[in-house]
Structures are given as structure tokens and as C-alpha cells.
Amino acid sequence: MHQDRKIEAGQAVYSPLVLGIYDFYVLGLSNHLLWRCPTRELQKLYDRNVSARHIDVGVGTGYFLKKAHWPVPDPAITLVDLNPNSLRAAAQRISRFSPTEVLANALDPLPVAGKFDSAGLCYLFHCLPGPLREKGVVLSHLQPLLAPGARVFGATILQGSAPRSFAAQALMNAYNRRGIFSNANDRIEDLDALLRYQFDDVEISLHGTVALFQATARAL
């Protein structure tokens, strides 16, 4: 499958209907029963790292942004996603913060101005085509937008180096065939390498098949 078609397949599944059941199906069932990473662990990751100036790339339904413990009452939040349905759903969910919406492909330079003190990339990498070393271009595009010391964090579902059940493997295989996932060779070692190449204070923890990561932006 051509890369442009793979990118389209990875985001096109998120129709309004799918987004309507996403929290229940993915965050409620899949995380706990298949990926074996309780959703509360992802929420803790957000709570530890969000800031007053935050950019979120690959926004899902905005679930974690709505529930996050923000350090200020009125954070400046920028949402970036290739899927207009996800972008709209997340923006509506946190409408009280009046977020900025940016429709963009994370594999291209981001049409965003300003400096951010935190950046979230939750469940983004496993939806992008190619090996992890190529997906690292997302971090290269993000880096100029980060203030020194900014927190970069997220999570991705691994296949290459994570223990998984038969059911989890079967679902991953199906998602990879359809282009919803592209993580057949994603390994924790590669994630660690691409983070350490551009950031400091890298921490990665494995919860079932899910790698949770956080790091600190360097001064350019």
C-alpha cells in the first residue's frame, strides 16, 4: 500500500460513529482486556506532564484532555489531527478552553506558530505508516515548537517487543492488514533510540503491549 494511502487508512476509520463508541471500546475494553494497559495509566501520564501551553498531536476524542489536571484554570491548548472528525470531537469536548484547531499531517512540517511547554502524542505512532525510525520525523517537526524544558509524552501500542495474548495478536494483525495500525515491527528499543536522539530525561515504561514515554525538550 502506498504511504499516502496508508496515512489515509490510519485516520479514516475515525468517523463520527466510531468516535461515538471509541471511549467505551478502546479506552474501556481494549486497553484493559487486550493491550493490558489500564486507561488510568494514560491519564496519570497526562496529569504528570500537561502545562499551561500545550499541543496535542493525534487527539482521539479529547478524553484525556478533558480529564487532565491542568496546572492553570485556562490553559492555551492547540489540537493537531489529520482527521476533521477527531479534531471537531476533541475541540467540542474541551470547548471551555477555546482550543486552537489545526488540520494537519504530523508527518509533514506542522503549520503551527508559538512555543509550547508540553506536547502529547497519545496512541499516534502505531497509526502512522513505516518503521519507528521513520515515524520519528513527527518529533523533528515538533521540536522547533517546544520551549526548552518542555515535556514531551505519549503512548504507543507495540508489537515487536511486547508480550501479548492470542486475542491481542489477532486484533493487531487485523488492524495492520486494514492499515488502521502500522506497528508490526515497532519495538521498544527503537522508540527509546528515537526519543534519546532528540530529547533528554527519557523515561519509557511498558504496560502490557503499550509503551508510555515522557522526555524533556532540549534548548535549540
Image (tube, grey):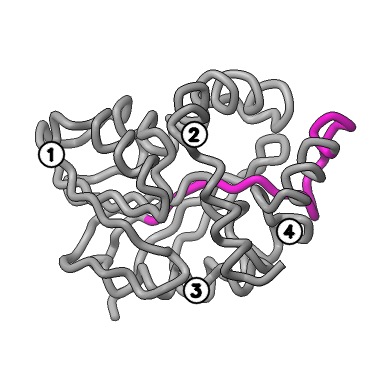
Name the residue located 54 percent from the left edge and 25 percent from the top edge: 27
Q: Which residues lie in the magenta part?
A: 152-169
Q: Residues within 10 Å of mark 4 (few under 14, many from 20)?
A: some
Element type where label 2 sits in the image: helix
Residue 44: x, y in percent? 43, 31
Name the amino acid type tagged 1: Ser
The N terminus sits in image quarter:
bottom right
- Of labels 1 and 3, earlier in sequence is 1
Name the amino acid type tagged 2: Leu
- Judged by depth in the image, the label closer to the viewer, 3 or 2, is 3
Judge from the rendering whether residue 73 lies leftward or rightward of residue 33; answer left or right: left
Q: Which residue is mark 1?
A: 98
Q: Which of the pair 197/53 is nearer the observer?
A: 53
Name the amino acid type tagged 4: Arg
Residue 85: x, y in percent? 38, 41
- Judged by depth in the image, the label closer to the viewer, 3 or 4, is 3
Rendered image: mark on residue 137: 3
- Of labels 3 and 4, earlier in sequence is 3
Element type where label 4 sits in the image: loop
Rendered image: mark on residue 42: 2
Q: Quadrant of residue 75?
A: top left
